Every structure is written in C-alpha cells, then in structure tokens.
C-alpha cells in the first residue's frame, strides 16, 4: 500500500481564508505559524508549506482589501519554525525570477543545516512586470524565458550545493585542517548565469533540499518532470487527478527518471462533521463565508475584466460580455479563465438553469471543497485517491488560521494511521527521508 | 544607574575572531555548522543581559586577502546566511537583540526589507540590521551582474577606488532608504478586519513608496505588515570618512574602531558632527579575557603563524582590566561597545560571567532587561510611520 504524503499549507492571501470567523487569529504573528506547524507535526505530516507573492494584488488599480493581505518572508519564518519543531519538513515558495542562484542557494543550504535536513523549496516563476516594479532588475522575462531561467537556476543552485563534498569540512584541530583545499569552488557558464568562485555553505544534511514545482502549463510540466522532487498541483479531483498523474509520471520516465522520484501533491481543502450531512452543512457555511457579497462581485470582475461594483450581489449576472482586451484589471494574480467569453456563457446557462444570483453562482463555480464528510469518509477518500494514483498525497489548505488543522489531526489522522497509510511515528529525520527520496540525490 | 546606560553587544563569527580560534582546546569546531552552536552562543549572550548580538556574514568565503580566495585550509571557511541564523535562534531567546549582517550591493532591497520585518515578527521586536557593502570582485563574480575592479592594498587611495567606494555607499544609502520606506509602507493599524464591509485591510493605510533613484526604483508597498518595532535599528561598521557619512545619515548605531581613548574622542566628534539626529556610537574591541589571556593569544598566534592584527583594537587581560578600559574610553563620548570574542564560546562566557558582573559592581550596567525590544534596550523610541495620515 502506498503511504499518504501530507503537507500543511499556512492559509492566507485568497478567499479560502475565513478571517471573519471569530476563531481566526493573527495571519502574521509567529504564534500562528508555530501553532499550525506543531499541529502538523503532531499529525506526523511530511511538511509545512508556505506560498509567496512579491507584490500586493491590485484590482482596478487599487490594492486588494477583501482577503488576507500581507505575509512574512518564507525562508525567514521557516528558520524560526525549525526551532519549535523537530521532524516536520519546512518548505517555502521562492521565486526564481527575482532572486539570484548564489544568494538563494546559500539561504536554502543554511536552512537545511539549521533544520537538520528539513528544507524544501517550491520554485515559482511569476514574473509579470507588475511584480518587477518592486525589484531593481524589473520585469523583463516573458513566460517561456521564465522557465528557461528557472531550469538553469535550479541546475546552478544544485551545482553550488555540490561544490562542497561531504568530507570537505574537516575541522580537525590536531592536523590543523579546517576545510579541504578547493572546498566550495564552482564555475557555471550558461545563457542566464555566468558565475564562478566559492560557495560559503558546507554540504547540508539533505545535500539537495527538496524542490517542488507549481506551474501547470506545458513548460511548467516539462520543467517539473525534468527537475522537481514534487509537484504542487491544482488537480485534486479523482478523474482529472489521475489524468494529470499519468501525464506527469510519463514525462518523468521520458526524462530517464524513476517515476516514483517525483511526488504529485494536489492542494486540497476539507470540511468535517460528525456525520456526512453535518459536514456538508459546515462546507456550505464555509463557502458562504469565503464568498461574501463583496467577494462575489470581485471574483465576477476578475472574469468579466470590468468594473461591476454597481451590480447587486444577489441579483442576476451582467447583460454585457466580459472585456477580452489584453490589459487585465487584476494585477498579481493569474487570470481565471483562458476563454472568458465561453466561461461567461457557461456561467449564464448555469445561473439560468438553477435560478442563481451572482453570489450563489460564484459560490457554485469557484473552488469546491475537496474532501467533505465524516472523518471516516474523508480518510477513506484521501486514501482512495492515493491508492488509485490520483495523487501521492495532498497539501491541505485549512480555511482557518491557526487552528484550521486541529480537527483534521485529531480525527482523520488516527484513521489514516489505523489503515497503515500514515506513519504513527517519524521513521526518519529529513524531509527527503519522509518522502522516501533519500537516495535520489 | 546614574549616568546614561552603557550599551554592550557582542559580535559573533565562526569560532571567534582569532583566525586560529577553532584550534583552541576549548573550541568545538565540529559544531560550527549546527543550530545548537548558535543557539548556545546567543543564549549565553542573553544570560549576560547584553543589548544585542551581531552575526557576521559575507557573500564570499573568508579570506586573508583583500579580494579573492586565499586557498588556506587552516582557518575557518564557510558561513550560514546571517538572517536565517538570527531567525533560528529567535524563538529560543526572549530579550536579546538579533542583528544579522546583510549586504546592499547584490541583494534586492525589497527582499531585505521583508526578511528583516519577518525577523522582527519572529523575535517580537528584537531585529536589527547590520548593513554592509560588498566591494570585492570575488563577490561580484558570484552574481555575474556587475563588474567590480579588484581591490589591492596599493589602490585604496586612488581616485577610481574612492569613486567606487563612494558609489557603493551611495547605493547602500538608497537601499536603506528603500527598506525604511517599506517598513513604514503599512500604517500600524492597517489591518482592520471589518466584517461589516468585508475588508481585511484599510487600503488607505497602505502606501506605495515610489522610490526612484539612479540605481533602482521600487514601487511598494511591502508584502509584510509594519514590523513590531516600526523601524528595526540599523547599524554599520565604519572606519573612515565615506562610511562615517553613510552611517551618520542612514543608521541608528555605528560601530567604530579607535585604538585608544584619544582616537575615540576624535572619531566620536567627527561622526556626531555629521549626524543630523541621534546616533549611538559603539567602539569595537577584539577581546581575550582571563588570567591567561596573553598566553592564549600568543599560543593562537603561533598556531596561525602570524601575529593577529585587526581593524579594531585587540585587548588581552582580565575582565577587571577590560572594565577599566571601557569606562576610560567611554569618557570620549562613546555610548558603549561591541566586543568581538577572540575565542568562542570561552571569551563570550568571560564577558557574560566576568565583565558584566564587574560592570554591574561599578553601577554602569543593567541588572535586568528593562525593555522587551531592541529599540527599547537602546533607548530609542518607536517612531511613527512616515506615511501615517497621508492618502495614497
Ligand atoms: C498550485 C499552485 C500554486 C502556486 N503558488 C504560487 C505561489 O505561492 N507564488 C507564486 O508566485 N506563484 C505560484 N504559482 C504560480 C506558478 O509559479 C506559475 O507562475 C503559474 O502557475 C503560471 O505558470 P504555468 O503557466 O506554468 O502554470 C502557483 C501555481 C500553482 C499551480
């Protein structure tokens, strides 16, 4: 039986997070991060996960204000979490477009040492000029070049990590040798990076911190298949999950890699209840909180690409069609649909058929809960997804900070453990070890 | 305490500041690249109620040459990213300030601002930033984005070297300005969680910083809410006129390296003359402490094959003698000292367990932390955000 891989996503910066719930705590204080990480470790999760964004989102030229805004720097907060956890993997999203290999390789190798081999890096490439306005190098890469740079970036970072051999750190006072001659020497010459010198961090416990990839396009999939240890995917539902899984594992094999050496981890939400009916009620309640009247209009604007603030959230969809011009009213977030006219037509048909106003329609068509049910049902569905190769595990996104994982760990985790698909105790101390990827470097 | 409090910090680096420190019988060289080593050092400094620790860093391997690797295998080589070290020890300590070194030459000010804000959150208001420039060609070659001519001992005073150093410090001043604006770009009460209107933040309290300079422009606002201290203290080490001007303009604390009381007086006068506002001036000293300090120093020099020299004065003697010296120099107008332990952890414990009690006996050092933040220890008030009240 396959083991289920589980990761805990610290929620924020999208309408998934129900900040209006009285139980919702700080999105920024360290205590919140520590609580979620400790809960995940109590549940014997594989890793903790942080997303990232380097510019606050704007819509119609104004800073987005309805969802959680603001978050800490990924690697800095993970290093602090290393002090309050002992086994949990610590994975952070860091952009390959607005960083440099030498600096980021140092940070990741440092985190790997400081956590005893628990570091992970989700490589993203977002590079729009909007984000570039926060950086001295600006936003000059188009979509295809981003992956070229990212691919060379990952290769370069790994060369830096390999620049110290395990035995280069000698530290023997008797012989007076601290480091072997030539330790850290590297030279890389490529289309994006032409660098050379000496790397400052001795070989870290995992040698290569885990790399995760999150792109979904052809380029993104190829990049992942060629280089990544795990994929954070959008395809969590069984049918599309299996299709994505087959596609990726075939690509991995085509790159001459063992398909088992890349783990597929869809993001997933959940809603629990004592009974399936109660869970459904909870899920509906969560959805209504996630999509407030204001949020419903805002999400509709993202598809329509127009100012719809005059519309009644409980009223019918706009008569006019979406604006399909290149210029998007939303900055810092990917567009909702590649074909807005077609999607709008589908939404109209659905609203017509089910007699739905804007808010109810938006609730219906955006982000469904992945796992809804009693703990027994949720445990069964998660396990079934993994055993049927729809996924190797899930990155769980709770809707509450910081207590959103408590109930899952208390009620679902023991059932997965009973089935023998989730460890009762950690058998290894490194993130690669947890995922069974120890020998892959 | 009657007079102004004496500020005391320690500078942490590798096995200590003597290049052969790692070979001292009391050193633990195999533990340098572990979290436990750093946690132990910072806990010891906190035990002594010191104001803060600084953590050295650079974007190249340590070297005895001005620029470029020296190929030596008998000295400590290798370092962690200093911000991550500071962050790793933050949850394990409660009061001491944590001041990592971060360069401004190859880094993005936006990333630097986020990382230090985050350090301020995870430490509940104890973060600082020791700003450094990277004037070495070897460091530039690690990035491959700009060319910096190689520094040579005989080229320091040439006009092109002076121009380069001026340029790097001007860039550092811009970087600090950007970081400071980003820290202020969220007003303190920007997060409103107003359920009635569905708004998580009041967008009128978030501000684009719109920095435009000759080297870079940054739009903002920060992705991190305003840090607990508002503005974490900024420090810099300075040895001559150009860095003095930078420090006086851009920092809250400057580390200087006089070699006697007379020089201390001159340096303090020069820097205070340049500073538009209040600035803490701390003198750096390398210290070997204990009855056997002189012997230890000679033994380590022998192991290294050279008499250890430093930019800062080197002191070897007992904690009582060091206390005499500090109080003497202090009359030059210094606010305190940043001590660089020659051997870690030995000379650090001699500071916390020998020097500190001695300073207390003389009524010049705290018996308990009176503040919870680094600004608090330094007697710096929490500043209001520069954009507060303005419309974006
Ligand atoms: C599940 C998932 C999570 C992502 N998380 C982030 C993130 O946290 N930060 C970010 O900048 N981009 C994130 N991205 C965006 C990707 O890095 C990438 O820019 C985007 O998917 C477009 O690339 P593509 O066309 O290959 O899909 C995420 C993408 C996916 C599919």
Image: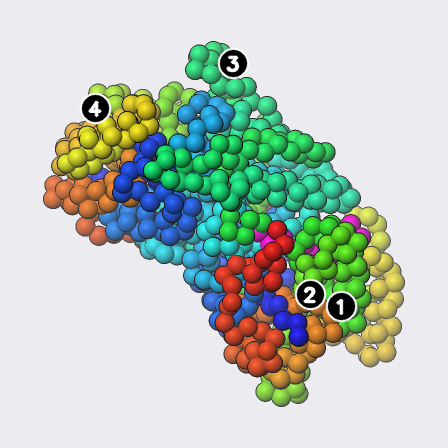
SS at mark 2 in the image:
strand
Asked whether the viewer can see residue B27, the reply is yes
Q: From the viewer's perspective, is residue A164 above or below residue A333?
A: above
The chain ID associated with circle 2 is A
**Pick the front one: B158 or A227:** A227
Q: From the viewer's perspective, is residue B187 above or below residue B292?
A: below
* Circle 4 residue: B261
* Circle 1 residue: A241
Q: Which residue is drawn at 64% across and 62% down?
A: A14
Q: Residue at x 74, y 74 (%)?
A: A388
* Circle 3 residue: B160
Label 1 crowd bin: few (<14), some (14–19), many (20+), radius 10 Å: many
Q: How far apart are marks 1 and 2 (CA)?
A: 8 Å
Mark toward the start of the polypeptide (4 vs 3): 3
Q: How far apart are marks 3 and 2 (CA)?
A: 56 Å
Residue A372 lies left or right of residue B127; in this view the side is right
Q: Are marks 2 and 4 in contact (CB under 8 Å)?
A: no
Label 2 crowd bin: few (<14), some (14–19), many (20+), radius 10 Å: many
Look at the numbered disc 4 and say if its residue's Cβ is closer than 8 Å to ligand 1: no
Q: Give the range drawn in magenta.
A: A209-219
* Circle 2 residue: A266
Q: Residue A300: x and y, percent?
A: 75, 63
The chain ID associated with circle 3 is B
Q: Are marks 4 and 3 in contact (CB under 8 Å)?
A: no
SS at mark 4 in the image:
helix
Q: Residue B35: x and y, percent?
A: 41, 51
A217 falls in the magenta region: yes
Residue A54 lies left or right of residue A327; in this view the side is left
Residue B115 lies left or right of residue A226; in this view the side is left
């Amino acid at each position: 039986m396959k083991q289920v891989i589980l990761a805990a996503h610290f929620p924020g910066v999208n309408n998934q997070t129900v900040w209006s719930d009285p139980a919702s705590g700080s999105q920024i204080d360290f205590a919140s991060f520590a609580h979620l990480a400790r809960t995940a470790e109590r549940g014997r999760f594989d890793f903790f996960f942080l997303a990232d964004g380097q510019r606050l989102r704007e819509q119609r030229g104004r800073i987005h204000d309805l969802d959680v805004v603001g978050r800490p720097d990924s690697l800095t907060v993970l290093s602090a979490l290393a002090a309050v956890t002992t086994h949990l993997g610590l994975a952070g999203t860091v952009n390959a477009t607005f960083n440099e290999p030498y600096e980021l390789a140092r940070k990741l190798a440092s985190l790997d040492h400081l956590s005893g081999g628990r570091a992970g890096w989700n490589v993203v490439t977002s590079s729009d000029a909007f984000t570039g306005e926060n950086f001295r190098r600006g936003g000059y890469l188009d979509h295809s070049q981003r992956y070229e740079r990212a691919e060379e970036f990952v290769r370069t970072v790994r060369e830096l990590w390999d620049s110290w051999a395990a035995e280069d750190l000698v530290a023997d006072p008797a012989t007076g040798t601290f480091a072997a001659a030539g330790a850290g020497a590297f030279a890389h010459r490529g289309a994006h990076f032409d660098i050379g010198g000496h790397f400052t961090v001795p070989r870290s416990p995992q040698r290569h911190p885990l790399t995760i990839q999150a792109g979904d396009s052809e380029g993104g999939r190829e990049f992942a298949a060629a280089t990544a240890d795990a994929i954070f995917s959008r395809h969590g539902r069984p049918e599309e999950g299996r299709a994505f899984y087959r596609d990726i594992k075939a690509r991995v094999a085509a790159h001459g890699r063992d398909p088992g050496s890349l783990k597929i981890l869809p993001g997933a939400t959940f809603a629990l209840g004592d009974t399936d009916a109660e869970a459904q009620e909870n899920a509906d309640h969560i959805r209504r909180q996630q999509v407030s009247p204001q949020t419903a209009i805002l999400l509709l604007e993202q598809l329509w690409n127009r100012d719809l603030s005059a519309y009644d959230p409980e009223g019918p969809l706009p008569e006019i069609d979406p604006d399909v011009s290149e210029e998007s009213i939303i900055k810092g977030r990917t567009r909702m649909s590649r074909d807005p006219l077609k999607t709008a037509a589908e939404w109209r048909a659905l609203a017509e058929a089910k007699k739905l106003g804007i808010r109810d329609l938006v609730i219906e068509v955006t982000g469904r809960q992945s796992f809804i049910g009693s703990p027994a049902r949720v445990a069964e569905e998660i396990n079934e997804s993994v055993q049927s190769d729809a996924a190797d595990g899930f990155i769980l996104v709770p809707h509450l900070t910081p207590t959103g994982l408590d109930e899952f760990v208390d009620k679902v985790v023991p059932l997965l453990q009973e089935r023998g698909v989730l460890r009762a105790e950690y058998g290894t101390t490194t993130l690669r070890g947890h995922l069974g990827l120890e020998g892959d470097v | 305490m009657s007079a102004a409090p004496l500020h005391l910090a320690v500078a942490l680096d590798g096995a200590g500041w003597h290049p052969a420190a790692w070979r001292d019988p009391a050193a633990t060289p195999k533990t340098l690249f572990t979290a436990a080593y750093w946690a132990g050092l910072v806990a010891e400094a906190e035990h002594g109620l010191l104001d803060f620790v600084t953590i050295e860093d650079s974007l190249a391997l340590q070297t005895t040459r001005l620029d470029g690797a020296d190929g030596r295998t008998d000295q400590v080589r290798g370092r962690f990213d200093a911000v991550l070290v500071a962050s790793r020890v933050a949850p394990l300590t409660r009061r001491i300030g944590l001041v990592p070194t971060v360069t401004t030459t190859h880094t993005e000010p936006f990333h630097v601002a986020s990382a230090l804000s985050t350090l301020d959150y995870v430490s509940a208001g104890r973060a600082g930033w020791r700003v450094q420039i990277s004037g070495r060609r070897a460091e530039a070659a690690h990035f491959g984005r700009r060319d910096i001519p190689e520094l040579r001992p005989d080229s320091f005073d040439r006009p092109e070297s002076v121009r380069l150093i001026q340029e790097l410090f001007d860039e550092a001043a811009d970087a600090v300005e950007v970081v400071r604006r980003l820290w202020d770009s969220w007003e303190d009460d920007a997060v409103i969680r107003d359920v009635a209107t569905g708004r998580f933040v009041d967008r009128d309290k978030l501000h684009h910083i719109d920095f435009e300079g000759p080297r870079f422009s940054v739009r903002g606002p920060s992705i991190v809410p305003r840090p607990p201290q508002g503005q974490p203290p900024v420090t810099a080490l300075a040895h001559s006129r150009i860095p003095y001007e930078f420090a006086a303009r851009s920092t809250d604390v400057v580390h200087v390296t006089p070699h006697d009381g007379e020089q201390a007086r001159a340096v303090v006068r020069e820097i205070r003359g340049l500073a538009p506002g209040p600035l803490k001036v701390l003198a750096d000293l390398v210290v070997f402490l204990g009855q056997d300090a002189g012997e230890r120093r000679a033994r380590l020099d022998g192991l290294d094959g050279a008499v250890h020299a430093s930019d800062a004065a080197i002191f070897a003697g007992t904690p009582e003698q060091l206390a005499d010296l500090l109080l003497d120099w202090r009359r030059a107008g210094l606010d305190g000292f940043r001590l660089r332990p020659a051997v870690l952890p030995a000379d650090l414990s001699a500071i916390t367990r020998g020097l500190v009690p001695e300073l207390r006996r003389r009524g010049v050092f705290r018996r308990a932390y009176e503040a919870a933040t680094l600004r608090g220890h330094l007697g710096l008030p929490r500043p209001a955000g520069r954009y507060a009240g303005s419309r974006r």
